[in-house]
């Protein structure tokens, strides 16, 4: 295994070349838990000297349209956590760090170098010079601190319960709960020097800064309110939907968002590789059949996700299908505020009643693996000894009979009109699980909720959801991104009360990389398997489809796919 600092400083570029076959993404085999004390990186070359910029000159003013399975839930990445929102904001906004496409390590973005100070309680960053936001505002240290202080100061009316906020998941609290927050301050040390200060060491802090939630917005736009204004034309659903006008430093400037589409334009003044795409459109197609039809008739140049039902059709018709390495977990959420689910025997019965192999084989892309834990096997902390509760219908009935359950109705929420990278066929997965739970003796009431009409909010807020289908797509290579995000603090999704587990997770996330930290996360995985606050079902493989216009695409297991890196065939324009 390479030294962590060596891995961290590598900054290669990678895209997936065009082939008429099913491909795998850049593997996460090289991804390790990275913790660097210091790193000096040579800044990226000037845009005009890059191969991508040279190629771009041969294909000018290209329009590229990409199909998605749902509208974004909002365009302020600090307040959302869904894939489609991040897909948009990654094009417009950038953070201090990005993800190396080969190693998965933090790599330079708006920061060119960084140094760990005070035994991990502070990090000093040198910022990229001569960068401007899309509105002409200069990017500098003050802009960085304006953003961090904004996130820290979010009021309850803005953040809701904070469950969708990555700031809350990484730092554990906001300013109005400063005693529990791990964020200390942001210090301007010069025009292009800034220091972030923590109250406790976070081993995965640099990795966390690669999250799209920590992208830097223009202070001018924030002050004017253009990044916080609810636009009633964005969606027919006015609840929990923010139509924002993000203003960042990224390769694309935001043009407009409306139901069914988002449009962006290439940033002519971008500091990095400008790429070949002048106009970028994201178009929403809720049904798999409409996505395929749009690809076939040329309305779109690619789409995400591919579902198992249409995978064979795409391959047989000669379309490009690119497959990401698995870095997400699909699970059944159990809400312990519902009295029946506060009984561990009931939760164990639910786990025993679910035939994970049938679900994976029938409703996921081949290669998807069943799982008994939440940490993916390519991350340190995965525990080979955790077997979980195996499928055993008779045991499920026995456990239920010995429990306090008396036939109470259990509302089972599931999303409709959307396919997620971690859940391509939600209605079918729901039907399979509901059938198995009913056979075990549970009284299941279906509650279908359209994804675009507040599904995530419905199942992550206080309410009557007993069971719900959800998933988590990993965003950086640290086990805390999985178990910390889901179980590291009390939340209304699970309503679990386990201070010991929270304490273990808090301790593990601050431990130095090494055998002790690995053992700590393995113990956490074992405890989750024993107490069953949720039932992990699969580590899904996701795939995208592309037309022949695409020569290569920046496929990423963590979905860090920025479209200035898309290469088009020379015959297109």
Image (tube, helix red, strand yellow):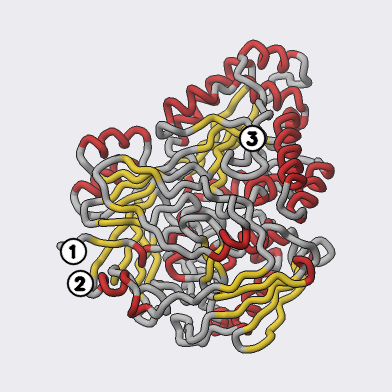
| Measured Cα–Cα span from mark 3 to mark 1 | 46 Å
Q: What kind of element bears circle 3?
A: loop
| Residue farthest to the left, as pictured | 571
Does the residue at mark 1 contact the one at mark 2 (Cβ under 8 Å)?
A: yes
Q: What kind of element bears circle 2?
A: loop
Looking at the image, residue 437 sits to the left or right of residue 553; the answer is: right
Label total for image = 3
Q: Which mark is residue 373?
A: 3
Q: Residue at x 59, y 75 (%)?
A: 113
| Measured Cα–Cα span from mark 2 to mark 3 | 48 Å
Characterize the local packing of mark 3: few (<14), some (14-19) or many (20 or more) Cα atoms within 10 angstroms.
Answer: many
| Viewer-side label of 2, 3 | 2
Q: Position of residue 412 (x, y in %)?
A: 59, 32
Q: In this view, does 77 lie above or below 452?
A: below
Q: Residue at x 70, y 70 (%)?
A: 116
| Between 556 and 516, the one nearer to me in the picture | 516
User: What residue sits right under mark 1 in the picture?
Assistant: 570
Q: Position of residue 186 (x, y in %)?
A: 71, 77
User: What residue sits right under mark 2 in the picture?
Assistant: 58
Does the residue at mark 3 contact the one at mark 1 (Cβ under 8 Å)?
A: no
């Amino acid at each position: 295994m390479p030294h962590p600092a060596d891995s961290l400083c590598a900054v290669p570029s990678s895209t997936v070349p065009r082939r008429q076959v099913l491909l795998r993404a850049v593997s996460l085999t090289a991804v390790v838990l990275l913790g660097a004390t210091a790193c000096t990186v040579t800044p990226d070359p000037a845009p005009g000297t890059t191969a991508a910029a040279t190629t771009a000159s041969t294909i000018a003013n290209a329009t590229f349209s990409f199909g998605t399975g749902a509208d974004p839930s909002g365009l302020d990445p600090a307040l959302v956590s869904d894939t489609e929102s991040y897909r948009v904001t990654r094009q417009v906004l950038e953070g201090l760090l990005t993800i190396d496409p080969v190693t998965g390590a933090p790599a330079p973005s708006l920061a060119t170098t960084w140094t760990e100070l005070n035994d991990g309680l502070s990090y000093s960053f040198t910022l990229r010079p001569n960068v401007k936001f899309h509105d002409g505002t200069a990017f500098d240290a003050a802009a960085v601190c304006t953003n961090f202080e904004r996130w820290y100061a979010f009021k309850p009316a803005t953040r809701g319960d904070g469950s969708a906020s990555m700031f809350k998941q990484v730092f554990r609290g906001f300013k109005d709960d400063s005693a529990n927050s791990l964020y200390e301050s942001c210090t301007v040390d010069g025009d292009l020097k800034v220091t972030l200060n923590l109250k406790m060491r976070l081993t995965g802090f640099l990795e966390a800064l690669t999250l799209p939630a920590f992208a830097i917005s223009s202070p001018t736009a924030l002050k004017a309110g253009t990044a916080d204004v609810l636009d009633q034309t964005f969606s027919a659903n006015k609840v929990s939907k923010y139509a924002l006008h993000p203003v960042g430093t990224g390769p694309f400037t935001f043009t407009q968002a409306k139901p069914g589409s988002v449009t962006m334009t290439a940033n002519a003044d971008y500091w990095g590789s400008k790429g070949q795409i002048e106009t970028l459109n994201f178009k929403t197609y809720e049904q798999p059949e409409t996505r395929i039809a749009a690809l076939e008739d040329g309305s779109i140049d690619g789409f995400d996700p591919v579902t198992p039902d249409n995978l064979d059709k795409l391959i047989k018709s000669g379309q490009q299908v690119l497959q990401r390495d698995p870095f997400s977990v699909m699970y059944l959420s159990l809400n312990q505020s519902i009295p029946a689910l506060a009984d561990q025997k009931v939760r164990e019965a639910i786990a025993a009643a679910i035939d994970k192999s049938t679900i994976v084989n029938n409703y996921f892309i081949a290669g998807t693996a069943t799982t008994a834990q939440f940490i993916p096997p390519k991350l340190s902390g995965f525990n080979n000894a955790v077997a979980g509760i195996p499928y055993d219908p008779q045991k499920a009935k026995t456990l239920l009979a010995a429990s306090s359950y008396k036939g109470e109705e259990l509302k089972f929420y599931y999303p409709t009109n959307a396919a997620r990278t971690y859940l391509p066929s939600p209605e079918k997965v729901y039907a399979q699980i509901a059938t198995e739970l009913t056979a075990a003796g549970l009284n299941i009431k279906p509650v279908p909720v359209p994804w675009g009409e507040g599904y995530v909010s419905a199942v992550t807020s206080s309410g009557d959801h007993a069971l719900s289908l959800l998933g988590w797509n990993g965003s950086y290579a640290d086990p805390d991104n999985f178990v910390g995000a889901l179980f590291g603090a009390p939340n209304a999704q699970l309503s679990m009360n386990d201070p010991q587990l929270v304490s273990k997770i808090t301790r593990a996330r601050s431990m130095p990389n090494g055998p002790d930290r690995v053992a700590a996360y393995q113990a956490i995985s074992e405890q989750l398997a024993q107490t069953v606050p949720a039932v992990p079902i699969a580590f899904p493989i996701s795939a995208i489809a592309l037309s022949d216009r695409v020569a290569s695409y920046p496929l990423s297991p963590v979905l860090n796919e920025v479209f200035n890196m898309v290469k088009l065939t020379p015959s297109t324009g």
